[in-house]
Image (cartoon, helix red, strand yellow):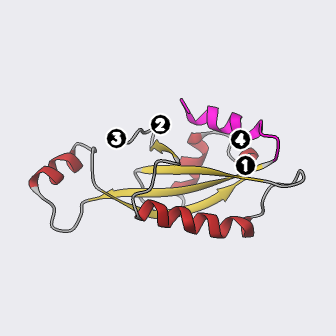
Amino acid sequence: MNDFQQLLQAASEQAEPQRLLFVFARADLPESPTDDQRDRHDRREGGTLSPVLCVDKLPAEVPSFQALASESTTTGVEWDMVFVAAMDGRAGFAPSTDEATRPLRLMVNAINDGQIGRFAAFDRSGEPIQFY
C-alpha cells in the first residue's frame, strides 16, 4: 500500500465486505538498553513495539487516516504507529465486532512476538512504514 486511502479503497472493493483491524503501538526502549539502542530510539528508528490500543471498524466507519488518528486521541493513549489487517466477510455480510475479537488478540500477540510483516503499518501522520 502506498497510502492509507489506498488501503481503504482496496478494502471497499473486495468481493466480500471487510472489517478492518487496527492495533496501535508505541515504540519503547527495551529493558537495559545499549547506547546504540538509545540512539536509534531517539532517532525514531528502533525500540520495542508495545501494543497499547486496538479497535475494529468497517471501512465506511473510517473516512480517513486523520479521522482515525483524531478519534484515537480521545482515549488519551499515546501511540507511534498503527498496524492494520482486514477480515473477509461471508455471504455478503461483514464480520461482526465479536468475530473480530480473537483475530485482534492474535494480531496483538504477533506484534508482541515481532511478527509484523503481514500487517500494513502507518506512522502518526499516516505515512506507510516499512520494516527492514
Residue visible at 75% across and 45% down in the picture = 60
Query: Upstream in the sequence, badge 4 or badge 2?
Result: 4
- What residue does disc 4 label? 11
Q: Amino acid at mark 4?
A: Ala
Start-end of magenta stretch: 1-16
Q: Nearer the viewer, mark 4 or mark 3?
A: 3
Residue 49: where, in percent of width, then height? 36, 58
CA distance separating discs 4 and 2: 16 Å
CA distance separating discs 3 and 2: 13 Å
Task: Give yes or no for contact between labels 2 and 1 (Cβ–Cβ under 8 Å).
Answer: no
Residue 81: where, in percent of width, then height? 44, 49
Q: Secondary structure at mark 3?
A: loop
- What residue does disc 1 label? 61
Asked if 119 appears above or below 110 in the picture, the reply is above
What is the number of the mark on residue 128? 2
- What residue does disc 3 label? 132
Residue 4: where, in percent of width, then height? 58, 36
